[in-house]
Image: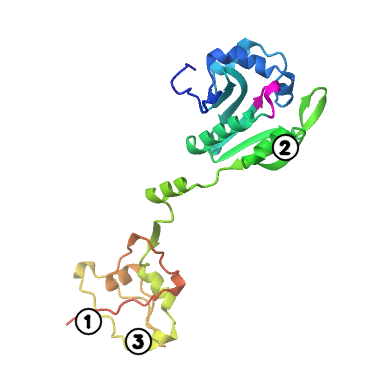
Amino acid sequence: MSETEENKPRDRAGVVVRAVRLSDAEEISDLINLPGYRAGTLRPPYQRVEEVRKNMENPSPGALNLVVTLEGKIVGNCGLNRLGGRRQHVASIGMGVHDDFTGRGFGLILLGAMVDAADDWLDVKRLELTVYTDNEAAIALYEKFGFEKEGLLRAFAYRAGEYVDAYTMARLRTETKGHRHRRQTQGGPAKRSFVILELVPSICNDRYRGDPRHKAEDDSEEPSRPSHRSPTRQSAPATHPRPSSGRRAHAPCRASSRRQGRRRRYRFSSTPSPPPWRRDFRPSPSPRRG
């Protein structure tokens, strides 16, 4: 990773948060080999500078590595690794502070910069991490940024001759005003709803047939007229007799559509249509032919 103009100070009062550089390999190697730093991570002891530089030269896709410096000296680092596939909205983070600079707010500055980058630039919905149960200072820091304990991992790691437990913690990004504005201007699900305005007439006939309110109207309807098709394409007489009660028999969907002159139509509407059981399914009366 080359040194660019992007590695500008975040705070010019002697404290700088910037991206990691290849020239930081030796100083980071000294940092991660400190006993206090190592006790809060999964790193093995006595890591070589060559191993650290190799990891810096081949970061994982979507990774972000930051360091915080005080007057040019690295006093802490933090890394974010983006997951993939169906968990591409998730990222895991890990961080540590120099043994001689703990409790002075450097972890707060470093984690704040990482959370801001994940929320505002990387579109990370969920941040997750693991922390040892006896690391109370780190747990308190994570809780300040909204991380919550989600479970206990028993015998999570082997450290200093014994197995230690760890908490799994996670933070879900809350929707800000900017996120809400972008979703509304781009047209989200709340702005458009796919509404069926008219149903197939055969479904309508099935729903209203047998309703006593329409019995008189059905009895007064004139008998069906003969078809005006050509003799060569004349269909066979209908095989559905008229019910004795005077109600109209159910016609095939194709004939019903032709008689009513109605087709299925769709359009986008800003207001949802009423449910099917609350609509008036009576078809419009057939026009009289002179």
- Image height check: is 21 above or below 192? above
**Front label number (1 vs 2):** 2
- Distance in Å between CA atoms under marks 2 and 3: 73 Å
Tag shown at residue 217: 3
The residue depicted at 66 percent of the width and 14 percent of the height is 30
Question: In this figure, which residue is indicated by the disc labeled 2?
Answer: 167
Residue closest to the eye, 43 or 4: 4
Is 152 part of what is drawn in magenta? no
- Picture coordinates of residue 179, whole percent (x, y): 46, 46
Label 2: state its secondary structure: strand
- Picture coordinates of residue 280, whole percent (x, y): 39, 76
What is the magenta range? 96-103
- Image height check: is 226 above or below 188? below
Question: In this figure, which residue is indicated by the disc labeled 1?
Answer: 288
Q: Earlier in the sequence, mark 1 or mark 2?
A: 2
Q: Residues within 10 Å of mark 2 (few under 14, many from 20)?
A: many
Q: Residues within 10 Å of mark 1 (few under 14, many from 20)?
A: few
Asked whether residue 83 appears in the rendered view, the answer is no
In the rendered view of the protein, which quadrant contains the C terminus? bottom left
Name the amino acid type tagged 1.
Answer: Arg
The residue depicted at 44 percent of the width and 82 percent of the height is 210
**Are circles 1 and 2 on residues that touch, CB within 8 Å?**
no
| Residue 161 placement: quadrant | top right
| Residue 254 placement: quadrant | bottom left
- Distance in Å between CA atoms under marks 1 and 2: 79 Å
Label 3: state its secondary structure: helix
Name the amino acid type tagged 3.
Answer: Glu
| Residue 154 placement: quadrant | top right
Residue closest to the eye, 225 or 66: 66
- Picture coordinates of residue 223, whole percent (x, y): 29, 84
Q: Earlier in the sequence, mark 2 or mark 3?
A: 2
